[in-house]
Amino acid sequence: MHTILLCGGSGQRLWPLSGRIRSKMFLELLPAPDGGKESMIGRVCRQLDHAGLGSTALFVAHEDQMALTRRHTRNRYPVIGEPGKRGTFTAAALGALYLHSTGKAKPEDTLCVAPADMYTDDAFFDCFRQFPDILADSQAELVLLGTRPTHPSDQYGYIIPGNAGSGAYAPVLSFQEKPDSARAEELIQQQALWNCGIFAFRLSFMLSHLQHMGLPAELTAFTGLYPEFPVRSFDQEVAERSRKAVVLRHEGEWRDLGSWDALTARLTDPVIGEGGIWGSSRDTHIVNGLGIPLHVIGVSGIVAAGSPEGILIAGKGEANAIKEILQNAAEEPRYGETGWGSYTVLDRTVSGPELILTLALSLLPGHDLPELQCQHSAKSWVILSGQGEIVLNGQSAAVRTGGIFTIARGDRHGIRAFTALKLIEIRTLAEEDDRRIYNS
């Protein structure tokens, strides 16, 4: 079996900590077994390994987040990049074609598609091992995994199953996408399950489905057409059209931590970062990624979240509205994570025809800011702390606290961190210069 994990979501409902540059799955906020913090993707990796499924994993991420995905998965699993975000079906097809073209999967092999940011108990992943046998026993073309609802949620899709008979699985009768609370209550009475977004099928099924759609079942040709593809969800494109689907029921924990209400319910500490909660402030959380204190006094049921991207103060039940608020926002990013570390935009100043951009860079020990050619009028690096090595036009020099390096247009430059390294970068950009900050 092969497990394709999709990393496509941006998580705007968890703004300002997640967004276009840093997806929610990379936020290291969840309690880890060792007493520290782990990310959603880190938790999934740990659980895959615990279930003996780590060797089956393939991560599909947007090209801009491949290095960041490798960093958070500690380079232990293969990661391939999507040329663009085109929905769960397209990403799943890309992963399937990669496995097929590289000879890692045969047409009769079982593929399991799953989100990389799910929050479940360990037993959830043990269900994956049943998929090949269920496909063989049921003669179905598709196996889904559903979990028993704990309340009538309007945030999840539902699977309506038929009679399970004596088996562990049941035929799928229909689907209901995010009903209102009253309809959700009716569905629960019909023994409906939350749709976990887990789909298992044979590779031959995906190849046949692509051909039926008139799409190439060959990796290079499929990738070449990627920019032209519309956004397609696996639910709508495959699951809801299937007449031979079954669902396996999971009785344990499963959640989509895609809202502040859901995420804070899984945090053991009411305050993460600098600050405090005082007075009568029941069910209030602070998640502060800023280096300045944030205090809440006498306000219950809110989340106060801060990052270089902004500050959110919201009632937990209303916090999802931030996604709509941000829909038309065209602001430049202020923070980003990369494979080598992170950057924060400290200042943007317009000086005549030029833009002066000031950044704080943090490099992880043993990581490189890759050598590249300066595309700006000028650039300066001021070393705040740490040790490393700079390469400037082929010449190496030691990097230490207090060092200053000036880089001119056209100079080839890069830096390697021996220890954790912090520096200030000051760019001078002409009107025609590339305004992008750093890729992942």
Image (spheres, rainbow, N blue to C red):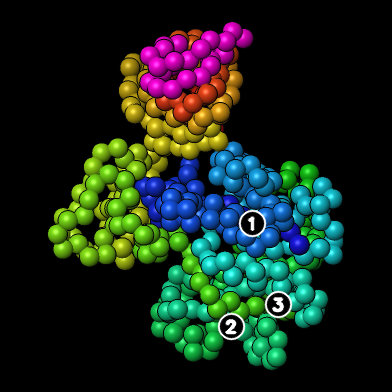
Between 55 and 322, the residue placed more toward the observer is 55
Task: Answer with mark 2 or mark 1, whichever residue precedes in sequence.
Answer: 1
Q: Which mark is residue 72?
A: none
Question: Going 34% across and 43% down the picture, which residue do you hit?
Answer: 289
The disc placed on residue 160 is: 2
Give the SS element for disc 3.
strand
Q: Which x, y percent locates residue 420?
A: 46, 28
Task: Examine the rendered structure and indicate whether residue 363 appears above or below residue 319.
Answer: above
Q: How many marks?
A: 3
Position of the N terminus by quadrant: bottom right
The type of residue carrying mark 2 is: Ile
Specify few, some or many for label 3: CA neighbours under 10 Å numbering under 14, 14-19, or 20 or more: many
Q: CA distance from mark 3 to mark 1?
A: 28 Å
Could you tell whether 273 is left or right of 251 in the image?
left
Q: Does residue 212 appear anywhere in the picture?
A: no
Q: Main secondary structure of the magenta part?
A: strand
Magenta residues (range): 381-405
Q: What number is the disc on residue 245?
A: 3
Q: Nearer the viewer, mark 2 or mark 1?
A: 1
Other-residue count near label 2 (Cα within 10 Å), few / some / many at <14 / 14–19 / ≥20: many
Q: Where residue 67 sits: x, y (%)?
A: 59, 38
Q: Earlier in the sequence, mark 2 or mark 3?
A: 2
Relative to 436, say whether 425 is above or below. above
Instruction: Give the amino acid at mark 3.
Output: Ala
Residue to which mark 1 is pinned:
49
Q: What secondary structure is found at the residue carrying circle 2?
A: strand
- Measured as percent of width and height from the top left, residue 121 is found at 53, 67
Q: Is residue 91 magenta?
A: no
Q: Is residue 393 magenta?
A: yes
Q: Earlier in the sequence, mark 3 or mark 1?
A: 1
Asked if disc 3 and disc 1 are in contact, CB closer than 8 Å, the reply is: no
